[in-house]
Amino acid sequence: MNGIPAGHAFAKFKMAEDPDILLDQIGMRIVRRRKELGLTQDEFAKRLGITRPNVGIIERGEQNVTVRTMCKVAEALETTVEELMFGAPARR
């Protein structure tokens, strides 16, 4: 049980039970989207206002990302937090 009520918009998404796996999945989605936009880690870091090494830490799933950071990442990657968290198609 993931704690999300059955009627909630996120209820249809299967989340990893292990936080490390979830962080890895989020990191992979961030890398994929960054590359889709043709951004280097340096360019992405500038959009976020962080250093390139910190981008690498996030992309490798080594940092527990805050909600605020996820919102900034989604904005910088022109997508949604939902897409980055669950791999759901971004609805515009």
Image (cartoon, grey):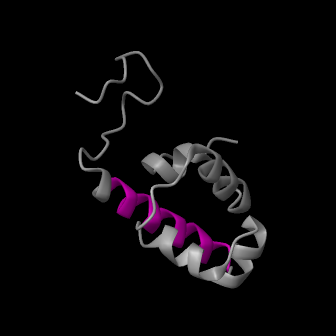
Q: Is 33 a magenta residue?
A: yes
Query: Where is residue 70 shown, x and y percent of the image?
Result: 59, 51
How many numbered tags mark residues here?
0
Q: What residue is shown at x 32% (from left), y 24% (from top)?
A: 3
53 on left or right of 11? right
Viewer-closest of 30 and 61: 61
Q: Is 58 a magenta residue?
A: no
Viewport quadrant of the C terminus = top right
Query: Where is residue 30 shown, x and y percent of the image?
Result: 53, 65
Q: In terms of secondary structure, what is the magenta stretch mainly?
A: helix
86 on left or right of 91? left
| Residue 5 to residue 9: above or below | above
Viewport quadrant of the N terminus = top left
Identify the image quadrant of residue 4: top left
| Residue 21 to residue 36: above or below | above
Identify the image quadrant of residue 60: bottom left
Query: Where is residue 17 shown, x and y percent of the image?
Result: 24, 44
Q: What residue is shown at x 58% (from left), y 46% (from top)?
A: 81
| Residue 66 to residue 77: above or below | above
What is the span of residues highlighted in magenta in the rendered image? 22-38
Q: What residue is shown at x 62% (from left), y 47% (from top)?
A: 80
